[in-house]
């Protein structure tokens, strides 16, 4: 597993735009900024759920798998083939691995990029 880096913002931006979930991600960012009681796993899961629900665009789906693969340092195809329970454990581990500050900052910056149309 690795932490978040600058290039991840642009990957996330493509996913959000391709999935058409800009408003959901901005709302999530606002909730984080307002201090809504959510742990990192909940925030990460909400972002992934929002993007997956908006995955009518196959490009967004491919981007999500590649992004998760990059962050977890596992091949995207390996993640795709995982049992759902195992995949959720990997996602939980990932969100726990990323520091709370990095997570909040990531969503803040992502929200700023989304709103700067």
Image (cartoon, helix red, strand yellow):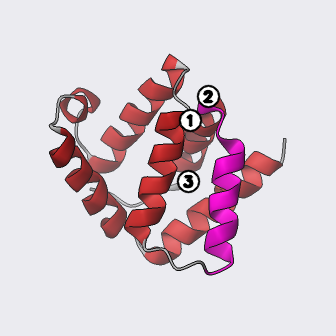
The dominant secondary structure in magenta is helix
> At x 65% / y 49%, what residue is drawn?
24
**Quadrant where the N terminus is found in the figure:** bottom left
Task: Say what secondary structure mark 2 lies in.
Answer: helix
Q: Which residues are magenta?
A: 19-35
Q: CA distance from mark 2 to mark 3?
A: 19 Å
Give yes or no for contact between labels 1 and 2 (Cβ–Cβ under 8 Å): yes
Front residue of 95 and 105? 95
Residue labelled with disc 3: 6
Label 1 crowd bin: few (<14), some (14–19), many (20+), radius 10 Å: many
Residue labelled with disc 2: 18
Image: 89 above or below 74: below
Residue 24 colored in magenta in the image:
yes
Q: CA distance from mark 1 to mark 3?
A: 15 Å
> At x 38% / y 33%, what residue is drawn?
66
Image: 33 above or below 95: below
Q: CA distance from mark 1 to mark 2?
A: 5 Å
Disc nearest the viewer among 1 and 3: 1
Give yes or no for contact between labels 1 and 3 (Cβ–Cβ under 8 Å): no
Residue 81 location in percent, x, y?
Answer: 18, 28
Task: Say what secondary structure mark 3 lies in.
Answer: helix
Residue labelled with disc 1: 15
Q: Residue furthest right?
A: 117
Label 2 crowd bin: few (<14), some (14–19), many (20+), radius 10 Å: many
Image: 36 above or below 21: below
- Lower position in the chain sequence, tag 2 or tag 3: 3
Residue 53 location in percent, x, y?
Answer: 51, 35
> At x 69% / y 43%, what residue is drawn?
22
């Amino acid at each position: 597993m690795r932490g978040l880096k600058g290039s991840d913002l642009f990957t996330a931006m493509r996913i959000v735009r391709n999935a058409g979930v800009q408003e959901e991600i901005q709302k999530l960012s606002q909730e984080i900024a307002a201090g809504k009681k959510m742990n990192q796993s909940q925030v990460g899961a909400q972002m992934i759920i929002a993007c997956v629900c908006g995955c009518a665009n196959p490009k967004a789906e491919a981007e999500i798998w590649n992004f998760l693969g990059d962050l977890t340092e596992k091949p995207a195809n390996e993640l795709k083939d995982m049992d759902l329970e195992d995949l959720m454990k990997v996602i939980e581990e990932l969100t726990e691995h990323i520091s709370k500050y990095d997570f909040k900052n990531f969503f803040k910056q992502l929200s700023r990029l989304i709103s700067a149309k």
